[in-house]
Image (tube, helix red, strand yellow):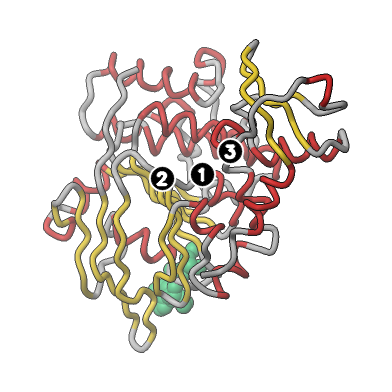
C-alpha cells in the first residue's frame, strides 16, 4: 500500500459568530501533515463548529483556513468536500446501499475506474478487519453499531483524502469496541499518512490518538501541545483539571522504559525478585510490574542484552517533575 502524504491544515484567527454568540473566537493552530490533531474541550466550546468550517459545512465569519497553503474559502465547496474525509458519530451509512457501495461512494463521484474502486473497497474492508467477500454485499442494517462505525471510517478514507475530519466517531460504541476501533484507526492512519483533525470530549482518547491536542474553552484555544507536554505542563488550572488528577500516570503511559534513564547493570543475583522489563514497555506498565513484585527496581533487557536497571525512585522523580507551569 502506497503511503500518501497528508496535507498541512492551518487555521488563522478563525471566528464564527451566530448573532451575539461567538461559537469560535480567533482560533489559530496548524495540524502538521500526516499527524492526528485532536480538538477537545467541554460541550459547547466550539469543537464541531471549528471542524465543520474546514470543509465549509459552516462558513467562517472571519479568518482563513489553509490546506497546503491554499485558502479553502476560494475553492468550490463540493470539490473541497470530496478531498476531505468526514466521519461523524451517527455515521449515516446509506441504508439501501451495500457496505461495498457505501465505501465506494466518493471514488464513484470522482469517476475512478471500476477496477480501482473495487480494489480500494476490498483493501479498506480488509484493513478494518472485514473479510471482503463476506461483508461487501451486506447492508448496514445487518451490521452491529461498532461495525457500522468502522464502515463509516473506511468510507471517509476511501478516496485517499489528504485530510480527514472526525467528530466523536467512536463516542457511541461501548468501551471495549471503542478501544479496538481506536487501535485499528491508528494503524490505518499511520499506513495512509492522512492528516486528521479529530474531535472528542474524552481526554483518554485524545491522549491515545493525538500527536497534538488542542484544548478549547468557550470558543478559544487554551493550549496546543503534544500529549506528553500537556500532561507535564498544563497551561492553567482549567487544563490541569481537564486532563485529570491522574495525569502523572497518564503521562507514564506515553513514555517507554527504553527512553528512561537507567542505572548501570547490577548482578541479577543481587536484585531479588526484580521483574524483567523490555525497552518497548511503557513506564506505566513497568511501574505496575515493579509494584506487583514489590521490587524497588526492574532489570531492563532487550533479548539477551542486559541494558541496565530502572528504579522506582526515577519513576517517582518523573511523576514529581510535572507541576503546572
Ligand atoms: N447554528 C447555530 N446557531 C446558533 N448557535 C450555535 C449554532 N451552532 C452552534 N452554536 C453555538 O456555538 C457554540 C459551539 O457549538 P459547537 O461547536 O457545537 O460545540 P461543541 O462541538 O464543542 O460541543 C455553542 O454555544 C452552540 O450553542
Ligand atoms: Mg460537537
On the image, which quarter does residue 191 sit in? top left
Residue 194: x and y in percent read 34, 37
The quadrant of the picture occupied by the N terminus is: top left
- Packing grade of label 1 (10 A; few <14, some 14-19, many >=20) is many
Of circles 1 and 3, the one toward us is: 3
Helix, strand, or loop for circle 2? strand
Q: Earlier in the sequence, mark 1 or mark 3?
A: 1
Q: Residue at x 51, y 70 (%)?
A: 325
Where is residue 224? Give x, y as percent. 41, 61
Classify 290 as above or below 22.
above
Q: Is residue 123 left or right of residue 244?
A: left
**Camera-side residue: 214 or 273?**
273
Q: Indicate yes or no: mark 3 CB to ligand 1 under 8 Å.
A: no
- Distance from the alpha carbon under mark 1 to that under mark 3: 26 Å
Kindly identify the residue that appears in the image at 43 percent across and 17 percent down.
Answer: 122
Task: State the residue in front, 310 or 105.
Answer: 310
Location of residue 304 in the rendering, given as x and y in whole percent from the top left corner? 65, 10
Between the residue at mark 3 and the residue at mark 2, the CA separation in whole angstroms equals 28 Å
Mark yes or no: residue 141 visible.
no
Mark 3 crowdedness (10 Å alpha carbons): few <14, some 14-19, many ≥20: few
Give yes or no for contact between labels 1 and 2 (Cβ–Cβ under 8 Å): yes
Q: Nearer the viewer, mark 3 or mark 2?
A: 3
Answer with mark 1 or mark 2, whichever residue precedes in sequence.
Answer: 2
| First in residue order: circle 3 vs circle 2 | 2
At 61% from the left and 23% from the top, the residue drawn is 307
Picture layout, residue 265 above or below residue 320: above
Residue annotated with mark 3: 261
Residue placed under numbered mark 2 in the picture:
36
Amino acid at each position: 500500500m502506497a503511503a500518501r502524504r497528508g496535507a498541512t491544515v492551518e487555521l488563522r484567527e478563525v471566528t464564527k459568530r451566530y448573532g451575539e454568540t461567538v461559537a469560535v473566537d480567533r482560533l489559530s493552530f496548524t495540524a502538521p501533515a500526516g499527524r492526528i490533531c485532536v480538538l477537545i474541550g467541554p460541550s459547547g466550546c466550539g469543537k464541531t463548529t471549528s471542524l465543520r468550517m474546514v470543509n465549509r459545512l459552516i462558513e467562517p465569519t472571519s479568518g482563513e483556513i489553509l490546506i497546503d497553503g491554499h485558502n479553502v474559502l476560494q475553492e468550490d465547496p463540493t470539490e473541497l468536500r470530496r478531498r476531505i474525509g468526514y466521519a461523524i458519530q451517527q455515521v449515516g451509512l446509506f441504508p439501501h446501499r451495500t457496505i461495498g457501495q457505501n465505501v465506494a461512494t466518493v471514488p464513484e463521484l470522482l469517476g475512478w475506474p471500476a477496477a480501482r474502486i473495487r480494489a480500494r473497497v476490498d483493501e479498506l474492508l480488509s484493513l478494518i478487519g472485514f473479510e471482503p467477500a463476506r461483508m461487501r454485499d451486506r447492508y448496514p442494517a445487518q451490521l452491529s453499531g461498532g461495525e457500522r462505525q468502522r464502515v463509516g471510517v473506511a468510507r471517509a478514507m476511501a478516496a485517499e483524502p489528504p485530510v480527514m475530519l472526525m467528530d466523536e466517531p467512536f463516542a457511541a460504541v461501548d468501551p471495549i469496541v471503542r478501544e479496538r476501533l481506536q487501535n485499528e484507526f491508528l494503524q490505518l492512519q499511520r499506513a495512509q499518512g492522512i492528516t486528521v483533525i479529530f474531535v472528542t470530549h474524552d481526554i483518554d482518547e485524545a491522549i491515545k490518538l493525538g500527536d497534538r491536542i488542542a484544548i478549547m474553552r468557550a470558543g478559544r484555544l487554551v493550549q496546543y501541545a503534544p500529549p506528553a507536554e500537556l500532561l507535564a505542563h498544563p497551561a492553567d488550572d482549567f487544563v490541569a483539571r481537564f486532563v485529570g488528577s491522574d495525569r502523572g500516570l497518564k503521562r507514564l503511559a506515553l513514555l517507554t522504559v527504553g527512553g528512561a534513564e537507567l542505572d548501570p547493570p547490577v548482578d541479577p543475583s543481587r536484585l531479588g525478585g526484580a521483574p524483567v522489563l523490555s525497552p518497548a514497555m511503557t513506564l506505566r506498565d513497568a511501574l505496575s510490574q515493579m509494584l506487583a513484585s514489590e521490587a524497588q527496581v526492574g532489570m531492563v533487557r532487550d533479548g539477551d542484552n542486559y541494558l541496565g536497571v530502572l528504579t522506582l525512585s526515577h519513576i517517582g522523580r518523573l511523576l514529581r517533575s510535572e507541576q503546572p507551569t
